[in-house]
Image (tube, helix red, strand yellow):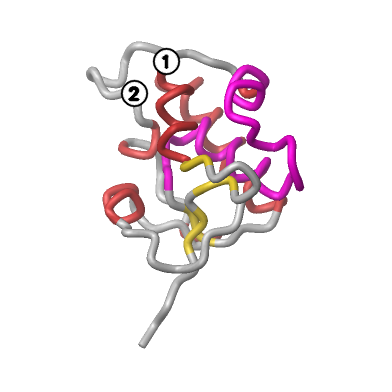
Amino acid sequence: MVWWVMVDRCICYNVPFSEVASLAKSGQSFDAISETTGCCQGCGMCEPYVRVVIATGRVSLPVLTRAQADVIVSQAEAWKQRVGSGSSGGHSNVADHAPHSGAVGLRPAADAQGSSGNGSSRG
């Protein structure tokens, strides 16, 4: 049996990444989201994950190193620049359209978002 540990929340403040994604979708910046939710203000382990959530819209992530998270964020930002804002056909979730980043073990967005998060969650 293969078991994946998925990270889906800030554990210090028990903030699900779905809340972070919703705030990002409404246009809030990283700093505003951190201030509103408390994310990244406790132990700080969720910061790379919060940045990935904001950049991609993914709300359930595999355990990542900071370097892996940085690569995902930079790829998502580069993709956004290539397609331009507002040209995504009405979809605002980059994870639905961005290239798959298999190098860091991310599953396609539909699988990741459909995950029930049954594993331990760290953020």
Cα distance, mark 2 to mark 1?
Answer: 10 Å
- Circle 1 residues within 10 Å: few <14, some 14–19, many ≥20: few
Q: Is residue 66 above or below residue 41?
A: below
The residue beneath circle 1 is: 26
Which three-letter amino acid code belongs to the residue tagged 1?
A: Ser
Which residue sits at x=36%, y=88%?
1
Which residue sits at x=27%, y=53%?
114
* Percent position of residue 44, x then y: 74, 44
Which residue sits at x=33%, y=47%?
109
Q: Is residue 87 left or right of residue 10?
A: left
Q: Is residue 18 above or below residue 30?
A: below
Q: Is residue 72 above or below residue 118?
A: above
In terms of image quadrants, where is residue 48?
A: top right
User: Where are the magenta residues, as a range?
Assistant: 31-59
- Circle 2 residues within 10 Å: few <14, some 14–19, many ≥20: some
The residue beneath circle 2 is: 92
Residue 32 lies in magenta, yes or no? yes
